[in-house]
Image (cartoon, rainbow, N blue to C red):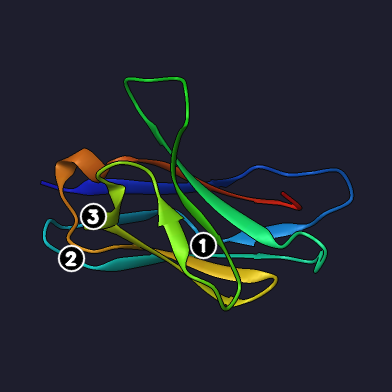
Amino acid sequence: TSINILCDLLAASAVIFQQSPPQIVDKNQEIQINCKHNDSSLLIMLWYQQRKENTSMTLIGSGYYQQSQSYEGEFEKQFTVARSSTVEGTLTIKNTDVSHSAVYFCAASTQ
């Protein structure tokens, strides 16, 4: 069974985001989705998941550069959120499963 991992952006005016291209992966893989933006004043990076059967987005986790990241609910068991700088971050799906077929969004905020 293939797992569709799509990536998209939540864009703010005048801020440019770059995110990994869509991926189709097998079960039991570890994959990374990278996100980069060009505004160093946006200190918080947030990651969202939008599953096919739901039009709403669910917050996976968020965090600041060089600080611990926070997760919503059970997401910490499935995902890792990391920051490599104030403008770059990575969402890692630890062990892909059919339940991870979704569109993943990165966003950035000042608060």
Q: Quick one: label 3 or label 2, which is nearer the N terminus?
A: 2
- Residue 1, horizontal then vertical, whole percent: 10, 46
Name the residue rendered at 21%, 56% in the picture: 77
Quadrant location of residue 44? bottom right
Q: Which residue is mark 2?
A: 29
Q: Amino acid at mark 1?
A: Ser
Between 10 and 46, the one lying in front of the other is: 46
**Seen in the image, is 38 located left or right of residue 29?**
right
The residue pinned by badge 3 equals 78
Give the mark, 1 or 2, whose residue is nearer the N terminus: 1
* Label 1 to label 2: alpha-carbon separation: 16 Å
In the image, is residue 52 above or below residue 70?
above
Would you name the residue on which mark 1 appears?
Answer: 20
Other residues around mark 3 within 10 Å, as few (<14) / some (14–19) / many (≥20) = some
Distance (Cα) linking label 3 and label 1: 19 Å
Helix, strand or loop status at disc 3:
helix
User: Is residue 37 found left or right of 61 in the rendered image?
Assistant: right
Residue at left 30%, top 41%? 73
**Image point 82% across, 54% down: which residue?**
15
Image location (x, y in percent) of residue 31:
30, 66
Q: CA distance from mark 3 to mark 2?
A: 12 Å
Expressed as whole percent of the image width and height from the top left, the position of residue 27 reads 12, 56
Mark 1 secondary-structure assignment: loop
Vertical arrangement, residue 42 with respect to residue 65, above or below: above
Question: CB atoms at circles 3 and 1 under 8 Å apart?
Answer: no
Q: Where 85 falls versus 13 (above or below)?
A: below
The one of 12 and 85 positioned closer to us in this rendering? 85
**Residue drawn at the location 51% of the way across and 62% of the way down:** 20
Q: Reading the chain from its start, which is encountered first: label 3 or label 1?
A: 1
Among the 4 quarters of the image, the one containing residue 29: bottom left
Q: Are marks 1 and 2 in contact (CB under 8 Å)?
A: no
For numbered disc 2, what is the local secondary structure? loop
